[in-house]
Image: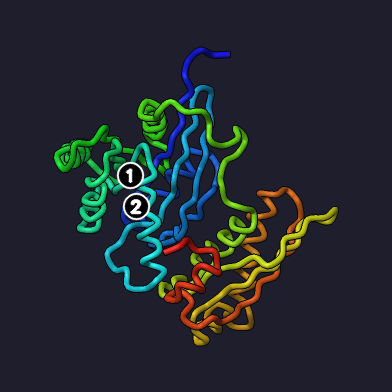
Amino acid sequence: MSDKPFHCGFVAVVGRPNVGKSTLINTILGSKISIVTPKPQTTRHRILGVDSHTGYQVIYIDTPGLHRNAGKAMNRMMNRTAANALMDAEVIMFVTEANRWTVEDQDVLERIQNTSAPVIAVMNKMDKVHPREMLLQAIAEMSARHEFAEVIPISAKLRNNVDRLVELVPGFLPESPPLFPEDMITDRSENFRIAEVVREKLTLALRQEVPYGLTVQVERFERDDNGIAINAIIWIDRDSQKGIVVGKGGKLLKKVGRAARLELKAEYGVPVHLELWVKVKDNWSDNEKELLRLGYESL
């Protein structure tokens, strides 16, 4: 048994919407614990990703993107979830895009400045910055914005420099025994992950406005010798959206079901039977009680 102390702690991965926070955590863990789409606000929940090694355990907190327009109850909840993660973390990863800085980035930085945890500035999408001198200039500009513990340019998608980032983290963690079993990779249930896979496929298939008014709830998950049977409800907040989600002749819903089935079959290694229903719950995304009932975090 090693005499070296064990280190363990929480790392909040924060930033404005759509900077690549979930992609980064999935890349670090080598497993898809959070869904990813090109559309902002894909991540709605606090999701823990557990990375266990000899001598240390890192618990990454994937968070919704912090954003200015938080009029609806769901948007306020997402901002609150991300803000709470900052308070819980021993280390903060502040993720931005290497090729741009926005007022929303500045808003997030101002929230971070109210915390005492060390902050690693993670400049994602470095592969989009050319020539190299432009990247060096962007790093210098980032370094001047705050007293960061480190400033690291990466490409989460291409895994450029991600190993260097991962190597830095344990040095900031406190001495502590592991908080989760070594073989555990996330705190989220099977039903949650299945619902998120379906929502990802819906978000990718639908036009811009609809994904923000839908959520998915798994009602049945059964496993037997023939495989896995899943029933899930797609909740929408207006009746006018039903035709869009189902598609002409049910084509879009079938396409979504097929894509979700294929991913789940690859994950579980057995046949998957997936049935989807579309139901209306008027204005659920602006109703605090409905949000809680559907599994969203407390406001």
Task: Determine whether 158 is above or below 163 in the image.
Answer: below
Amino acid type indicated by mark 1: Asn
**In the image, which disc is placed on residue 19?**
2
Q: Which residue is mark 1?
A: 124
Quick check: marks 1 and 2 in contact, CB under 8 Å? yes
Assess disc 2: are there few (<14), some (14-19) or many (≥20) residues with their C-alpha within 10 Å of its C-alpha: many
Q: Quadrant of the N terminus?
A: top right
Which SS class for mark 1? strand
Vertical comparison of 209 with 200: above or below: below
Query: Badge 1 local density, few (<14 within 10 Å), some, or many (20+)?
Result: many
Indicate how the structure is coloured in the image.
rainbow
Q: Classify residue 230 as left or right of residue 103.
A: right
| Identity, as a three-letter code, of the amino acid under mark 2 | Val
223 or 174, nearer to the observer = 174
Outermost residue, right side: 225
| Image point (62%, 53%), residue name | 189
Nearer-the-camera pick, 14 or 206: 14
Question: Picture coordinates of residue 101 (x, y %)?
Answer: 21, 52
Q: Secondary structure at mark 2?
A: loop
* Residue at figure coordinates x 20%, y 53% from the top left: 106
Q: Residue at x 83, y 55 (%)?
A: 224
Calculate the distance from the C-alpha at mark 1 to the C-alpha at mark 2: 7 Å
Image position, residue 43 (x, y; %): 45, 58
Residue 268's disc is: none
The residue closer to the viewer here, 287 or 17, is 287
Above-or-below relation of 269 to 230 = above
- Counting from the top left corner in percent of width and height, residue 126 is at 30, 42
Residue at the bottom extreme, as displayed: 240
Q: Residue at x 39, y 49 (%)?
A: 85
N-terminal-most mark, 1 or 2: 2
